[in-house]
Image (cartoon, helix red, strand yellow):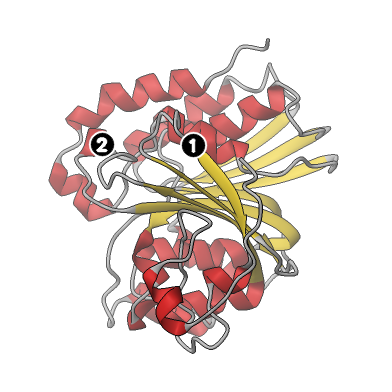
Amino acid sequence: MPIQLLEHADSIRRAIAPGITLKRKSALGQFMTPAPVARFMASMFPPSTLTKCKLLDAGAGVGALTCAFLDRWATSDGFSFHDAQIDAYEIDPTLRAHLNRTLARYLSRLPVSYRVVPDDFIEAAAIQSLAPRRYTHAILNPPYKKISSLSSHRMILRQVGIETVNLYSAFVALALSLMKPGGQLVAIIPRSFCNGPYYRPFREYLLNRAALRHLHLFASRTTAFKDDDVLQENVIMRLECAGVQSNVTVSNSTDDSFSDLVTHEQPFDRIVFPDDVDKFIHVPTSLGYNAIELSKGVLFPLLENAA
């Protein structure tokens, strides 16, 4: 089996994370992805017969997500790319130095080229969104931080038709705007976008431009970024740019060991109720009906468990 570098990236994360102050983490809104989560996210991409891959990693940190993606390719697990080009955005100079060294290790292992981009992703992507779409794949752990209504980021986003209140939703929306039709985007983000009025424009943006293919929910709020003491319920989702919506794969696990992973297929009408003008996104954890569905008198076909 080819040497994999995700564990190398994870060892860097564990080494430098204690030295990053809470104030700095809060300022950047970035929490680095542990190896088990990165590996699971890379596994969510469907097999691809594309010969050329163009991968976007916005908010790349030390490179765990890109490493997980490239390690999967190196094992010939569903990817048959002849070559891959990577754009990894990272604004923090300390993390960027580690990211550069880690990705450079792949040059002798895979037919890959990469750019480590120091630019502000929102500013850069807003400009690029007006150009032809370029990416076939995107893998994201975007920063989590509120956007002020009077900030330059808010104004830039509005100019390209994106209305949202947090960096994480802005990153996902912009990444989607850069994807080719059929492009696959996997992101881990807070579950807060699934409901509430503030995220309605973001939900409409996603659902109008992509098909929701997979949702994964952690039962524990402290699991995904436990090393950073993040008390946040997270969801991992896969979107297909310009895809035709069909059933949605829903999976859940207690923690990032994924030892009790349960997977099943759900009708999309059970994820977003047809008559819901707010487009709330529900994540059913079983095939049985929940209280909301029963109170609405909605009947859905029970599908066989696909686990």
Relative height, residue 143 to residue 301 (above, below): above
Residue 126 can be seen, yes or no: no
Left/right of residue 82 with respect to residue 27 in the rendered view: right
Q: According to the image, label 1 marks what residue?
A: 261
Find numbered disc 2 in the image and state the secondary structure of the residue it sits on: helix
- Report the amino acid beneath label 2: Lys
Quarter assignment of residue 16: top left
Residue 222: image tag: none
Q: Where does label 2 land, which residue?
A: 226
Image side of residue 23 versus residue 139, left or right:
left
Residue 304 horizontal/vertical position (percent):
66, 51
Work out whether residue 64 or residue 296 is closer to the camera in this orientation and state it. 296
Q: Quadrant of residue 225?
A: top left
Q: Residue at horizontal 85%, vertical 39%?
A: 51
Q: Residue at 39% of width from left, 37% of height from top?
A: 33
**Where is residue 278 shown, x and y percent of the image?**
45, 85
**How far across and how far down the image is residue 48, in percent?**
79, 42
